[in-house]
Amino acid sequence: LTHPAAARWSLLLFILPALAIYLMFAVVPLLSSIVMSFFDTNKELGNVFVGIGNYVYLFTQPSVSARFWNALLNNTKYFAIHVIVEVPIGLLLAGLLTSGALRRSEGVYRTLLFIPATLSVVIVGFIWRLIVNPLWGLVGYPLLGSQGTALTTISLMSVWQYVGIPMVFLYSALLAVPNDLVEAARLDGASPWKIFWDIKFPLIVPQFGLIVILTFIWTFNGFDLVFALNGSAPGPNYSTDILGTYFYRTFFGSSGQVADLDLGAAVATVIFTIMLLVTAGYFWFVQRRLKSHQV
Amino acid sequence: MQMTSISSKSALPAKADIRPWTLERITVHLVLIGFVILALGPIAVVIINSLKTTPAIFGAPFALPFGDTFSLAGYGRVFTRGNFLLNYRNSIIVTVSSVGLTVIVSTLAAYALVEYKLRIVPLLAGLFLIGVMLPIRLGTIPIIKIMAALGHYRYAAGAYPCLHRDEHPARRDADDDLFPHRPGRA
């Protein structure tokens, strides 16, 4: 047994490199982002404490707040499409891969289906822009050019790219389901459908919940695909604007919009708070109630 | 407890599957083949088009390259006009150094978090976990200030720490939004 004082010293030594990098480039920037949102640095006087002034401006200035709510609504739709399409397809594929119907081809399918997730978003944007182009593409309708369809189209491009992630995640969860349980159910005459929903799925609910909340985190962090396709003022008429691009535009500015560092910090803090609340709420209300079984 | 390790032999059975082709197995294969086509089809379109002339791409983007439409000119231009080798070298430098640093530093930390049972350990683990959930983009403004203070603002080297702390592959591309005014960025 290690002496407590020695253990404390070793722990510190082992953890120090990671902690130093993490504090300097993640914790401190995030915290100072919050601090900055309470100041106004655009004045010639230097930093002026303005309290919640930036937040009041963000939520009361009509054009600024309208864009924010629009981005939040779009981001919610973006997340909803991922949960409705990407996660169930990932579950279906994982279920088929572990259904016992495959032998040697299991690894081949798994690898092939994961390939799009390894592509760069810029390439994904390029590929799909070519395919959905109304002039020479598969559909004669401007999917990316119409306000009604642009966001769904971009969401589905992202779903196409990342469907391999929930697949692999749930696949490894399903592999951990003990074979004796499945075998016992099969001997009792349960159909594959029943085995999946009554035996396997209840045992992977924790991982299923986790992939949903991870999808929430990833989609609310979303930025790159929209930016690669539509730039920092994502059209048509901001119909594909999500929180990531809204923040980028506020902070870095874009055509017709002056960069505003303090307002950017306020936007960052609001996004930060939304994500923290939803994630904490999920772990508090859902993940905490999951029971663990000894099988 | 079940543990997994890597072996020199494939874990999958090498024997041929001798079970009969039931309707159930055929259906599973058909559905999976359908999704494989959906996953790889768009990539195939790009590869096919890379072998065609520019007018042929816009004339019939989904046609195979035959006769006149076949051209390897694009591959030549990648190396003569695109500065491809420089970009490739930069990508390798960024990837290798950030993956290397991440693996070394986080393995040390993970070992300590598992090995030492002190009261502060769950707190530290929680602190690291929060970082996985929050996008570093929200800390962009202070990071640029830190970089400027370190004198790294004008060097690509300044991008490493940001890449390092978030190993999600998509972040690699988001790097450019952290340093939009970096010299050498098109």
Image: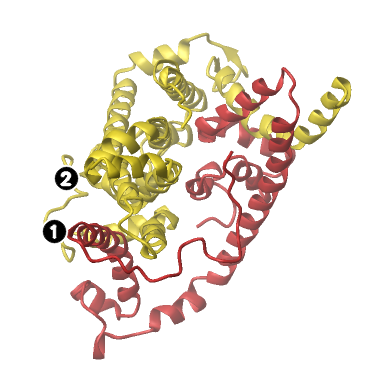
Which mark, by number, is residue A146?
2
The residue closer to the viewer here, A187 or A240, is A187
According to the picture, the residue beneath numbered tag 1 turns out to be: A139
Residue flagged by tag 1: what amino acid is it?
A: Val
What x and y, as percent, mark residue A62? 29, 18
- Does residue A238 appear in this view? no
Q: Colour of chain B?
A: red
> Furthest residue to the front?
A187
The residue closer to the viewer here, A59 or B65, is B65
> Furthest residue to the bottom?
B67
Q: Residue at x 24, y 66 (%)?
A: B20
Q: Which chain is yellow?
A: A
Q: How many marks?
A: 2
Q: Is residue A211 left or right of residue A128?
A: right
As helix, strand or loop, the secondary structure at mark 1 comes to: loop
Q: Is residue B56 above or below residue B130?
A: below
What x and y, as percent, mark residue A183? 35, 45
